[in-house]
Amino acid sequence: MAAGRAFLRAAPSSLAAGAGRFAFACPTALPLTAAAAAATGPHRRGRGRCYCSASDAPPPPPYVLTTPLYYVNAPPHMGSAYTTIAADAIARFQRLLDKRVVFITGTDEHGEKIATSAEACGRNPKDHCDTISNSYKMLWADLDIEYDKFIRTTDRKHEAVVNDFYSRVLDSGDIYRADYEGLYCVSCEEYKDEKELGENKCCPVHLKPCVPRKEDNYFFALSKYQHQLEDLLTKNPNFVRPSHRLNEVQGWVKSGLRDFSISRASVEWGIPVPNDTKQTIYVWFDALLGYISALLDDGEKASLQQAVERGWPASLHLIGKDILRFHAVYWPAMLMSAGISVPDAVFGHGFLTKDGMKMGKSLGNTLEPKDLVNRFGVDSVRYFFLREVEFGNDGDYSEERFINIVNAHLANTIGNLLNRTLGLLKKNCKSTLAFDSIAAADGISLKDNVENLVDKAKDQFENLLLSSACETLMEIGNLGNLYIDEQAPWSCFKQGGESAEKAAKDLVIILETMRIIAIALSPITPSLSLRIYTQLGFTEDQFRTLRWEDTKWGGLKAGQVMMEPKPVFARIETETDEKDQSSSKATKGGKKKARSQGLVEA
Ligand SMILES: Nc1ncnc2c1ncn2[C@@H]1O[C@H](COP(=O)(O)OP(=O)(O)OP(=O)(O)O)[C@@H](O)[C@H]1O
Ligand SMILES: [Zn+2]
């Protein structure tokens, strides 16, 4: 195929299936949840619903979002979890906007590093890949990750797609054979330019000396795409985000692109090069294709064309900055060569660091996400990393900071406010709302402030400013706390009459604020949001069908009965807390401790 063909956006011929938890099959398209089918019939749009429209109009293209396919040289760590949590939050936000989301993750399983790691564990490579790939899946379940597709590069369908792709690039005249000599970092699986290496020719990421290598390989004519890549980056400045990374990529391209080798003669654990079984395909020329082969359903005809028609191009590749060159330079050029649309955007976030160094499997300086979940709960882990690290920049982990942030924001600002309010409602209103939230907020500025902040958070989510979105939503919580403290409904109830009526309205106002926070924060803290939502008297099924537009003020109606107040978030106890508690027990009968856990009224 000619390299210069038009890059048309593929019209999806059918729809990507959701995760296999839906019980009812729609006859025409996606499966439905039992509840959605019972409540609404088949023609609904959104997560867990079918997308077949009554008018039979073609469905809009899906929002395809990917994480890197993680290398199975070792089990996942907090760095891999960070990208996946961020992607999950973005996918959940897009689903709230009623987009048809295909969230892809998976594992990259070929190459020298995998073969070596398998040997070190005394396993054959396939068994090793099965074990490690599974550990990723288990961690994603622990972290409330709702992916739609999990691709493994050892899947058969993937191999078929890689073969088709290789043939297309060959037909474009972009593959040739040559000798190559250079310095290689096995951990990066990449030849390095000497000028980017540190002392003793060490890789700057892995701090290990690169080794001289000479091979007779197949090459991809990257240099041919210099102008097309320059054009792509100039005409579409949003292709690489954040903007400082675009500058970096433009710098690489401007400095001149060198063809790169796409096969390895010395590596057996890989997909054989078509028509040359002595070589295997270079791991990156294989793994990147996983984003396309993931779109295929299991069991369907596996071909590149079929996969592309399933929803390509990707809307967003979310990656760490370490693999930006592969995604923002090599990958679009490869796609151009094969006559396939380039993705809409690549976002390269920063590193989680430990003592200033990138946390990574090769350096072994990792933090275990499962330990953090066991100790602090999944919402804390998701919230802390997305709130604390400005998305795009590096961030260092500190346990003290983790505990302080999570306690201040999730336990105090959110959990305690809900608990105090529900406690007052139980004591004074039999846990039942006396007013609609719209009527209760008539003339109250808090309502306008909440609405403005929700709009701001939506904008921030849309622009991937995840930390800022958390901050904005916490501002709403702070306004709620300020409001209840200023209005002091506990004393108004005691006064009776109009004051008590006003107090009953104030409780509705706060609970409506909590309802809105629960929805808007659900991309970040889905479990916590569900607990808040069900305490407000809604069902889990209602929670699952929520959309962003449900953040509009007015969801709570008079007569709605709230649940028993139960702390929705357990404050993380520290040694200082324990000391405080023993002294407060002696003086105040433990009231302080109880309040810090969200157990008592103001
Ligand atoms: N310290 C980190 N901070 C943020 N993201 C990370 C970090 N480490 C890994 N990731 C995520 O994982 C991707 C790299 O995946 P990979 O499986 O190669 O893990 P790795 O731990 O970086 O491996 P290695 O240390 O061998 O390079 C990154 O692009 C990023 O998405
Ligand atoms: Zn390296």
Image: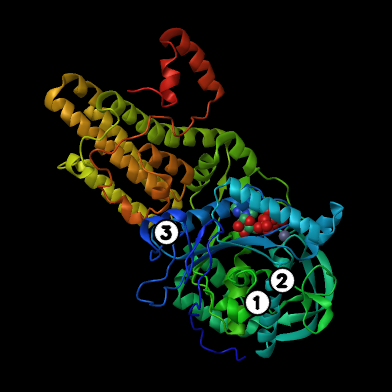
Residue matched to label 3: 37
Quadrant containing ligand 1: bottom right
Contact? badges 1 and 2 (CB < 8 Å): yes
Residue 558 higher or lower than 306, as above or below = above
Q: Position of residue 47 (x, y in %)?
A: 45, 59
Q: What amino acid type is highlighted by mark number 2?
A: Arg
Label 1 – label 3 distance at C-alpha: 31 Å
Q: What amino acid type is highlighted by mark number 1?
A: Ala
> Which mark is on residue 302?
1
125 and 100: which is toward the camera: 100
Lower position in the chain sequence, tag 2 or tag 3: 3
Label 1 – label 2 distance at C-alpha: 8 Å
Q: Quadrant of the N terminus?
A: bottom right
Q: Is residue 399 left or right of residue 28?
A: right
Q: Position of residue 566 (x, y in %)?
A: 42, 29
Mark 3 secondary-structure assignment: helix
Q: Quadrant of the C terminus?
A: top left
Dot 2, crowdedness within 10 Å: few (<14), some or many (≥20)? few
Mark 1 secondary-structure assignment: loop
Mark 2 secondary-structure assignment: helix
**Residue drawn at 44 percent across, 61 percent down:** 49
Residue placed furthest toward the top: 586
Q: Colour mode?
A: rainbow
Q: Position of residue 400 (x, y in %)?
A: 55, 33
**Residue drawn at 54 percent across, 54 percent down:** 146
Lower position in the chain sequence, tag 1 or tag 2: 2
Which is more foreground, mark 1 or mark 3? 3
**Residue drawn at 35 percent across, 76 percent down:** 55
